[in-house]
Image (spheres, grey):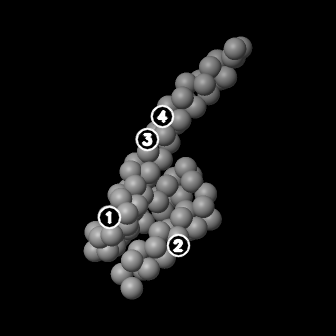
Amino acid sequence: MANTPQAEKRIRRNARRAAVNKARVSRIRTFVKKVEASLAAGDAAAAAEALKAAQPEMMRGVAKGVLHKNTVARKISRLAGRVKALTA
């Protein structure tokens, strides 16, 4: 339990930040799922469009400090490779 006013404030702030970060990660996952659904359906055009929409969201997660840069780079690279393989 927090003993000082500053520690109590940090607990409140951390709870607010956790809620914001959880919403951001959830939003990113939704965009990625749209790409994966298009890939599973075999729709190359929809997959390319979904990837185009997902990339900025994922990079925004990096900028906001929710996800690590290399993690997002790896995920974008793998998704792009799958989309490219579907179009070829």
**Residue 27, can we see it?**
yes
Tell me if 50 is positioned left or right of 80 in this view: left
* Residue 75 horizontal/vertical position (percent): 54, 64
Q: Which is more N-terminal, label 4 or label 2?
A: 4
Looking at the rendered structure, the kind of residue marked 2 is Ser
Looking at the rendered structure, the kind of residue marked 4 is Ala
Disc 2: which residue? 77
**Of the pair 9 and 85, the residue shown nearer to us:** 85
Residue that extends furthest to the front in the rendered view of this protein: 41
How packed mark 4 is, by other alpha carbons closer than 10 Å (few <14, some 14-19, many 20 or more), is few
Q: Secondary structure at mark 4?
A: helix
CB contact under 8 Å: marks 4 and 3: yes
**Residue 23 image label:** 3
* Residue 70 horizontal/vertical position (percent): 62, 65
CB contact under 8 Å: marks 2 and 4: no
Q: Which is more N-terminal, label 4 or label 1?
A: 4
**Residue 53, can we see it?**
no
Q: Secondary structure at mark 1?
A: helix
Q: Residue at x 32, y 74 (%)?
A: 44
Tell me if 46 is positioned left or right of 51 in this view: left
Whole-angstrom CA distance, mark 1 to mark 2, is: 20 Å
